[in-house]
Structure formats: C-alpha cells, structure tokens
C-alpha cells in the first residue's frame, strides 16, 4: 500500500520557445508523473516578467496534482521536467523555457535548502493567485482566504488568454 495522496499546487511559467506550447506540454507531462494524478489546470495567463524587463512576457498557469510523492520527490520530478524542456538558469528571474514551482503541498510548511513551501513569493504574484483562485477558489493560504490575498495584489498586467 502506497503513501496517502496529498494535494499539491504547481505554478507553471514560460517565456521562451513557444511559451504557450511549453506550458500546455508541461501540463500534459504533469498528468503522467508517477504516483500522481492531475486534478485541475487553470487557464493560461500572459504576464509581464518579474525582475529584468528586457525579456518576453510570460505564459503562466497553475495545476492541482494529487500525488503520493513526497515533497522532495515531487520537486525532483518537476526539475526533471524543466530539464527536458532545456531550462537554463543563466540569471535570477531571467527568461526560461519552463519554470515549475511547487507552490503548496497539502498543509505542509517546509523550509529546507532545496524547497520552501508555501512558495515564499506566491502571495504577492497575481500570475500565481489568479490562476490558483480559478481552480481552488475556497483555498485558505497562510491562514487567510485566497480572496484576501487577491485583494492585496494589483492585476499586475495579467491577461487571461482565450481557451484555444
């Protein structure tokens, strides 16, 4: 008998090499992770980059995953997917083919050298909060309703893409 399933939320982003296709392909790949099941995926959103502005806009989404993987095993799987998409870490907040962030893992709080959950910047980023609210509107985040966090961030130029 395996470990009980936990609900994890994954942030997806891309701004290189056909970002819409990168994110769509990554959502399909998340659905195929071992001991995991994709239970929801948000719409795609276009957002301005955080940090250096001399790069293309990003395409973002959030996915909900039921998984029996431990947080670090899930992180390993996410980083392997980034590598399959030829992710290069050339500068902080720089352009990338695929960025997969483990935003939340059950109700766990993790603060290790490799992983911080809840993701430390997620409450300030519309490109995380809006897609998250789309798939988990009643979620509580850091002991506050998600809607409270949404009220505290500006739209930040976020634009929901039409479903294609």
Image (cartoon, rainbow, N blue to C red):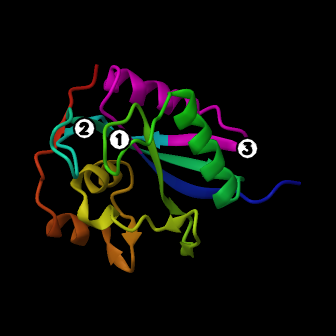
Lower sequence index among marks 3 and 2: 3
* Quadrant occupied by the C terminus: top left
- Mark 3 closeness class: few <14, some 14–19, many ≥20 residues within 10 Å: few
Say which of 2 and 57 sits in front. Answer: 57
User: What residue is rendered at 55% in x and 74% in y?
Assistant: 111
Report if residue 141 lies within the magenta region: no
Task: Answer with mark 3 or mark 1, whichever residue precedes in sequence.
Answer: 3
Q: Position of residue 24 (x, y in %)?
A: 42, 26
Farthest-out residue, front: 90
**Pointers 1 and 2 in contact (CB under 8 A)?**
yes
Left or right, residue 109 beside residue 62: right
132 or 75: nearer the eye?
A: 75
The Cα–Cα distance between marks 1 and 2, rounded to whole angstroms, is: 6 Å
Q: Circle 3 sits on which residue? A: 35
Q: Which residues are magenta?
A: 12-39
In the picture, measured across the screen, residue 29 lies left or right of residue 9, that is right
Task: Give the answer, above or below, for where 162 lies relative to 130.
Answer: above
**28 in magenta:** yes
User: Which residue bears the numbered disc 1?
Assistant: 61
Q: Which numbered disc covers residue 45?
A: 2
């Amino acid at each position: 008998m395996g470990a009980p399933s936990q609900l994890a939320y994954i942030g997806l982003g891309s701004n290189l090499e056909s970002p819409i296709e990168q994110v769509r392909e990554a959502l399909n790949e998340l659905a195929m992770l071992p001991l995991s099941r994709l239970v929801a995926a948000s719409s795609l959103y276009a957002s301005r980059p955080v940090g250096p502005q001399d790069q293309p806009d990003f395409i973002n989404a959030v996915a909900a995953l039921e998984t029996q993987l431990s947080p670090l095993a899930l992180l390993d799987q996410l980083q392997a997917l980034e590598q399959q998409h030829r992710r290069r870490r050339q500068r902080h907040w720089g352009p990338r083919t695929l960025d997969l962030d483990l935003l939340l893992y059950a109700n766990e709080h993790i603060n290790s050298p490799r992983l911080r959950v809840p993701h430390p910047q997620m409450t300030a980023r519309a490109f995380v909060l809006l897609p998250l609210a789309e798939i988990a509107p009643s979620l509580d985040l850091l002991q506050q309703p998600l809607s409270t966090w949404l009220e505290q961030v500006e739209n930040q130029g976020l634009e929901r893409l039409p479903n294609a």
